[in-house]
Amino acid sequence: MARIPSSLSLEDLDQILPQIVDQGLPDGGEFVVANLNEGERTAALVAVLVWHGFLPMSGGRRKVGLLLGKLHINRCVLEPQKTHLGKKVRKRAKAFRLTVNKAWPEVVRKIQELTYTSAPGDCWLTDQVVKAYQGVEKLGPRWRRNIRFLSVELWHAETKELVAGEIGYTCGSVYSSCTGFTSKDQYPGAGTVQLAALGAWLAKQGFQLWDLGMEIDYKLELGGRMVPRAEWAQKVRELRTLAIPLETPLGDEGSAPKLLAMLREVPDDERGDPPKTTAKAELPARDVKMPSEEPAMVG
């Protein structure tokens, strides 16, 4: 883990990060770390990290006030049009509809309540990092580039209840899932429907790559594949300049059954063994492994 000092200019960092991506961190790890309470600089730092393929997150309870940038040694990615669809998902989808960026505060609140690293309340999506994400939208074009943070929501069509969702971001024609929630006790399978419907919508909008972060069984079940850091970096550099907006579906475009109709149903024998993860790991699009070592210095 390497620390980004507050004295290091964003311009210099913008030049240094490609070298770190290509050559690796000094300790061979996956994290860079910086202060999380520096206002506009923090928002710009988040954008710079995203531009170079890092996942920006907070240190949670264990590293309060710190911004972490995670550069996975191996990344789980998926071409949206290749999102896998099982029979059960299609049946469950009838009750739901998908929206984009219609309930950011509620999605954030539910993630903070329902999603955690090791114990309830231990959620890395802190108010500080949420504020930094929102600050990216206010940046000038020099640092915002083609980056936008947004929420994705799955609603129960009859009760209008928010049953699953996530926070993610676009960087050109790449969409990255940060972290999410699902009301799996009340609505079993809603998280899987949300992910499948989102994959279909990303494909329809023209996104070339879906970044799912760290390896978890349900992501592989969705169709994700693991790629080494070098391949991930190459893809980001190829696709980040192609700006594609991720808008909300209009009218019945957001109907989950209609979205899933665009995907090929994958037979069980092609999907491999059932996920071996626990119920807690069924939450969509989470990235929870946290660093513990003391940081070296960047720059």
Image (spheres, rainbow, N blue to C red):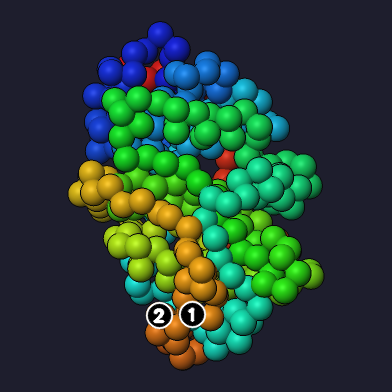
Q: Secondary structure at mark 1?
A: helix
Residue beneath disc 1? 258
Q: Please, is residue 241 above or below residue 214 in the view?
A: above
Residue beneath disc 2? 262
Direction top: furthest residue:
7
The picture quadrant where one finds residue 256 is bottom right
Q: Does the CB distance between marks 1 and 2 fall below 8 Å?
A: yes
Residue 72 visible (yes or no): no
Query: Could you tell me how far apart the alpha carbons at marks 1 and 2 are, in whole angstroms?
Result: 7 Å
Residue type of the residue flagged with mark 1: Lys
The picture quadrant where one finds residue 64 is top right
Disc 1: CA contacts within 10 A as few (<14), some (14-19) or many (>=20): some
Q: Residue at x 55, y 88 (%)?
A: 87
Direction front: furthest residue:
251
Nearer to me, 91 or 284: 91
The mark closer to the camera, 1 or 2, is: 1
Q: Please, is residue 60 above or below residue 33 in the view?
A: below
Q: Position of residue 57 (x, y in %)?
A: 53, 37
Q: Position of residue 137 (x, y in %)?
A: 44, 33
